[in-house]
Image (cartoon, rainbow, N blue to C red):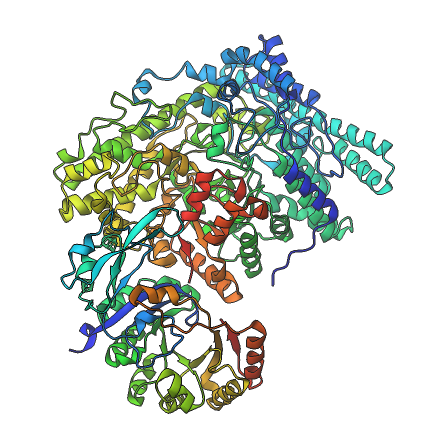
Amino acid sequence: MSGINLKGKVYDIQGFSIQDGPGIRTTVFLKGCPLSCPWCHSPESQAFGSQLSWMSMRCIGIEQCGKCLNVCEKGAITPGEVTKKSGTDEDIQYVHINRKICDNCGSCTEVCYPGGLSMCGEEYTVNDLVDRVSKDTPFYEQSGGGVTISGGEALSQPQFVFEVLKSLKEIEIHTALDTTGFTDGKNIDAVLPYTDLFLYDLKHMDSVQHKQVVGVANEKILENAKRIAKAGGKIQVRIPVIPHFNDSQDNIRQTGEFCKSLGEAVVLVQLLPYHNLGITKYQRIFDDVKVLEAEPPSDEKIQKLKEILEDFGLTVTIH
Amino acid sequence: MYKLKPVPIKVLKMRDKYRNTIPKVCTSRLKIVTDFYQNNPNITGILKRAMVFKEIAEKTPILISEDEVVVGSMASTYRGSALFPENDITWMQADYDNGKLFNRELDPYIIDEEDWEYIKSVIPYWKKNSLSAMVDQYIPEGYFSAVGNQVTVYNSEGICAAPVGHFCSNYDKAIRKGFGAVKAEAQAKMAEMEGHMETDTIKQYNFYRSVVIVSDGMIVLSKRYAAEAARQAAECTNSERKAELEMMADSLNWIMENPARTFYEAIQVMFLYQIGMCLHNNMHGISFGRVDQYLGSFYEADLKAGRTTPEKAQEIFDLFALKVAEMNKIWFSGTTLTVTGYTVGQLMTLGGVDKENNDATNAVTYMMLQTAGRLILHDPPMALRINKNTPKELWEAALETTKICGGVPTFENDDVIIPALMKNGRMNLESARNYCLIGCVEPGGTGDEWPACGGSGGEAYWNMPMAIIHAINDGNNPMTDRYGNKSDKRTGAHTGYLYEMDTFDDVLEAVTTQYKYFLEWQMTMVNMFEVVAAEHMAQPLISCMMDGCMESGKDVMNGGAKNNSCGVPGVGIGNAIDCLAVIKYMVYDHKLCTAKELYEAVMNNWEGKEDLHQFILNKVPHYGNDNEYCDEWAKWLLNLFADIVSSFTNIRGCKFAPGLYPVATNVLWGLLTPATPDGRRKHEPLSDGISPVQQLDKNGPTALLKSLANIPQEKYSNGTLLNMKFHPTALSNETGMAKLEALMKTYFSMGGMEMQLNVVSGETLRKAQENPEEYKDLVVRVAGYSAYFVELFKNCQDDLIQRTELTL
Ligand code: SF4
Ligand code: SF4
């Protein structure tokens, strides 16, 4: 299959996304990622396949509904404990999903009208996706915005991403690609002509530590950054600031040096301080919370890191 | 970076006083008017109206409180409230009888026992002599069969308690010409006519005669204030205040009769004229118009001549705004369910374009925002006119202000409003370019139009989903009315039941029939009211300034103004649109249930039909998501409403003008509206303004705005209202603000007419609900107005918390 009928797996499309590049943007989140960052706030992004998500906020409980109980042939759904409905004093009995049994077939989501159960991961053809995101063109035009393709690691679906970016450029929409950089150089080469801006994660300059914590070494990542710079691409570097991992002044200094070595290509460096807001999202698709829990870095610390980077003549923002 | 300047102590003290004074009911006006009416049964019509004003001007208590520079009062005490028995006062007895008069939960008033004794003693007289009593006699017989429909709004007491309002007089003329000149003009016209009057000239003569009388009244009122200022000056030992009082006395002696000479005098004219109009009528959306345009040149001249400094002028504007904020009127306790915070809609407009279409921003534009921001003041409400050349700094100042003071200012789009005002023969280009906002969001002429929404300014809010209920229920209201009566007769047209309709076209036909039926009744009732009111409620004090009346010799109530209009606002459009989409989707397109099933589920308030209910809420397309399935019916329905309204003619010769805004009636109307096919349960609030149903817009602000821009807003020259709630984190930095600005600009470029913002988190609102003391100054936009959140009716608070919060 090729061209506009090619399919990709999307887990979210967010309009009025204003942190993922210039102007008002629509960000498309693709499923699947080869890295395993412990602080990841998008648990639904990691696996390549669709996953069942259950949101207590929208489930109306067994007494009012309970339809999903009768649908799961694997017996993965059973009555759960009686608790208080969030924000109220009312008792509610939710359902319990046994993740070990559930094979993410999705049958239960079809009967769940309130939207408690839903599948994370929906197939889109290039054509449908481009149609969907181009709906907001008036907003992109007014604000200098456009579309950001994010993940997961978007380039894990390289052909799909290539076709999407190409189609977007055909209709003159500004494109940004949010990537970990962990992909084959040829994938980068392919998308380069159709990507106005790379949002590029740099997590650690030391490859050993990089591998230890996120599961892959960083050589390929740094290599690809150079590749983009050499080809005249534009890069917005993003540094997640994670306590006890990459928040040392030393590492930030090295990162700054690397950015500087990329020359004109780096238009902006963003510091993204760790925060602990991802926990409830985990509960939607996993039994246990696997996300890193740590004290967010202090404002002073971040400020200091910002200054270090600025000393390299870089433009730095904090988000 | 936008900065608030420090507030002078004097202003702070005044603000504290405003926030901490519980208004007291004052019987002065009641006594003056009652005596006059009882002693002069021989004086009638327009002369009676003129003379009663002069009587008020001569006798109303003169009050100059400590530190006041801008003066004028409705009552004998600071923040006091006057009574208007000639409109209607029976509501007071009703409130007393149901125990609400002395213990209002919201917007409480102090009423002295002996004052109440007096009020009680005159109620029987007014029961037979007030406007509401007279209007009641004229209700067409046929209308009684429609009573209880809950679609149309008509009750004489409600309308007559505010029989005149929602307009903007020509303040600029009052400032620059004065009442002396108007009086001379009227006298000259009379001299010309004297002794040879035929047909209409007699009426014109009477009109001019009344103009002379009210002009004298305004001059007398000003001079009485001058005398009081002089008296206080003589007694004052503080030399600074003494000089100030002397300056005030000098100005008050001069203005009203003569053109204003300074920035201060121009403000004082505006305010005292406002007091005059309010003392004459009541207060209901009497809007100030383009305040920055009136004042800009005075400010510049004062600066140039060294008569003032930016700080001094700002202080005067602050004090002026606080005087406006102080004004209030007691009304039946039920109104606090829709509008609270003592607000009476004395809207001020800023920004916009001039005659030549150039941006008209001036220093006073910024001054106005500065006042709202640094005093965290929701009253007077402010509306900012946006055009393509609105300066960047003004955008910034306005967005920063709305962050501090929710919904102040509102943003109004010149590019849509100006052409809309020129449709249907409403006004010419020059007038349209000079438009202002009235009441809450209604575009209207600045000093040259009598727009009188609902005929009286008591808006004729029209319940859109309720008419659809009638359409699928053979013209019956399934619910008991607000008095607990279940109507046993058909209150609408005979259109059959949903389950008798074979196709969706049949449904549309039934809806069309009911819309036509109820809208025509609504406008008929407005016309009927206007005919009676014109006879008894002539407005020489407004007419003498309003463009067109002095030329035509006709009162505004008789169509004398240069331009005329009459608004009819629809409420609950989100629900109404979804009703159509749901019926079509479920019954006719996808046949997911039978018409009978859906009908019964709705009539039983979804009891036992939770599955169907959930499906409708979550699986059927809803308006506000950039979804063509719904947007098509949005267009259809809103064209239907607009076309019916704008084809009907008002007694003043103009066409009616459709609008889409609810103030906060969406909450109250919701309580009175049964379950609706869109999945709404009985009693739940209706959707707000042109917004989708609460929390059913799931695709974010861009999709929402595209849906809203798709409806024919250009046909709604009576105004549309969009309230958006943003989480503060979205707007915590400059980039966020720039993107918000771009969002609004895109909406405007796609045809959006108006937008107002709340930048507040649901969490903050919930906390404020729990600890009101700590959130005393939290201002939020409700719908048509802003208010201190903690002073709102609980259901309104909940409705605000419920609204979709746009975050990242
Ligand atoms: S079907 Fe959905 S709403 Fe119903 S009990 Fe299951 S999860 Fe909850
Ligand atoms: S996704 Fe399939 S296996 Fe998992 S709970 Fe639902 S029905 Fe059962």
Where is residue A23, by image quadrant? Answer: bottom left
Judge by depth and name the residue closer to the eye, B759 or A5: B759
Judge by depth and name the residue closer to the eye, B592 or B436: B592
Where is residue A177, by image quadrant? Answer: bottom left
Q: Position of residue B786 (x, y in %)?
A: 52, 43
Q: Is residue A4 above or below residue B739?
A: below
Where is residue B137, by image quadrant? Answer: top left
Q: Position of residue B640 (x, y in %)?
A: 28, 39
Residue B213 visible in the picture: no
Q: Position of residue B787 (x, y in %)?
A: 53, 42
Q: Position of residue B143 (x, y in %)?
A: 33, 20
Using residue B244 as the reference point, say whether residue A254 is left or right of it: left
Judge by depth and name the residue closer to the eye, B422 or B80: B80
Q: Quadrant of ligand 1?
A: bottom left
- Labels in figure, total: 0
For the N terminus of chain B, which image quadrant? Answer: bottom right
Q: Is residue B215 above or below residue A154?
A: above
Judge by depth and name the residue closer to the eye, B635 or A213: A213
For the C terminus of chain B, which image quadrant? Answer: bottom left
Residue A81 visible in the picture: yes
Q: Residue at x 26, y 34 (%)?
A: B469
Q: Is residue B24 above or below residue B770?
A: above
